[in-house]
Amino acid sequence: MLIATEGFKEIGIATVVLGGVAFGAYCIAWPLAIPFVVVWIWVLAFFRDPPRRGSFGPGELCSPADGTITEIVELEDHPSIPGPSIRIGMFLSLFNVHINRSPCAGVVRSLSYHEGEFLDARHPESGQRNESNSVVIDPSSPMPGPVEVRQVAGLVARRIICHAKAGQKLTTGERFGLIKFGSRTELIIPRMEGTEVTVAIGDKVNAGLTLLARQPISPTDEKPAPTKVATASELA
């Protein structure tokens, strides 16, 4: 099992603290040490970094995080995307892989960090009120853009890590960051005629593997007129 280097500090602390407590408990009665060993295994598993090799065609966007779809919302305006857009929100539990990946190939246009609160990541206002980091990407042609990935801290998560830099080229599914201990990730894309959301509320998704949405590929630079998005439930 590959382990994210960003978690080495926490794993080291957990090893020393939990190892010491487990040893003391073992000296009293060996079954008492079991819960501490289980917690140590969980800390190790939290920072797992499995390899991902998804396959996506032109106009297809993959999930930027592992988790559960909790929100699919149409927006009339968004700061980084001119015109109508759609936001797909994912909740990452304490048992999900917490690596963030690029939803498409492209160049990082900008990054912006915002201080905020630490509401539970399932709270409907957590995306707007919590600490967050936004990565805006200009997708490679012919994908329409821009698209934005927002890393949002949760009740337990207190540290957002982002390795992406402005001007950096990313490939689809490329690893660019991590949120420690429970969080939320959002994907915001332009809402266009032909935009198709391929997931529904409650779906489980995997970063770099699950297809979240398809965008129309136009042979010209003309931007199609906004229209209502077809969600996975409506297409069923």
Image (cartoon, rainbow, N blue to C red):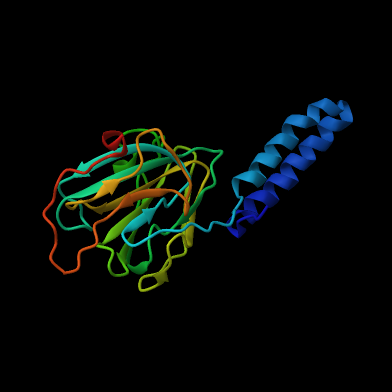
Query: In the image, what residue occupies the spot 14% across and 62% down?
Result: 223
Q: At which x and y percent is residue 78?
A: 20, 52
Judge from the rendering whether residue 60 lies leftward or rightward of residue 8; answer left or right.
left
Query: In the image, what residue occupies the spot 17% across and 43% down?
Result: 228
Query: In the image, what residue occupies the spot 86% across and 28% down?
Result: 30
Q: At which x and y percent is residue 2?
A: 65, 55
Q: Quadrant of residue 18?
A: top right
Locate the C terminus and report the quarter of the image it occupies.
top left
Judge from the rendering whether residue 159 lies leftward or rightward of residue 86; answer left or right.
right
Query: In the image, what residue occupies the spot 64% across and 45% down?
Result: 45
One can see residue 170 in this view: yes
Judge from the rendering whether residue 218 lies leftward or rightward of residue 21; answer left or right.
left
Q: At which x and y percent is residue 138?
A: 29, 66
Judge from the rendering whether residue 89 lies leftward or rightward of residue 229; answer left or right.
right
Q: At which x and y percent is residue 143?
A: 28, 64
One can see residue 113 in this view: no
In this rendered view, identify the residue nearer to me: 50 or 117. Answer: 50
Q: Quadrant of residue 149?
A: bottom left
Vertical order, 158 against 68 (above or below):
below
Vertical order, 145 against 151 (above or below):
below
In this rendered view, identify the residue nearer to me: 205 or 15. Answer: 205
> Could you tell me how many numbered marks the image carries?
0
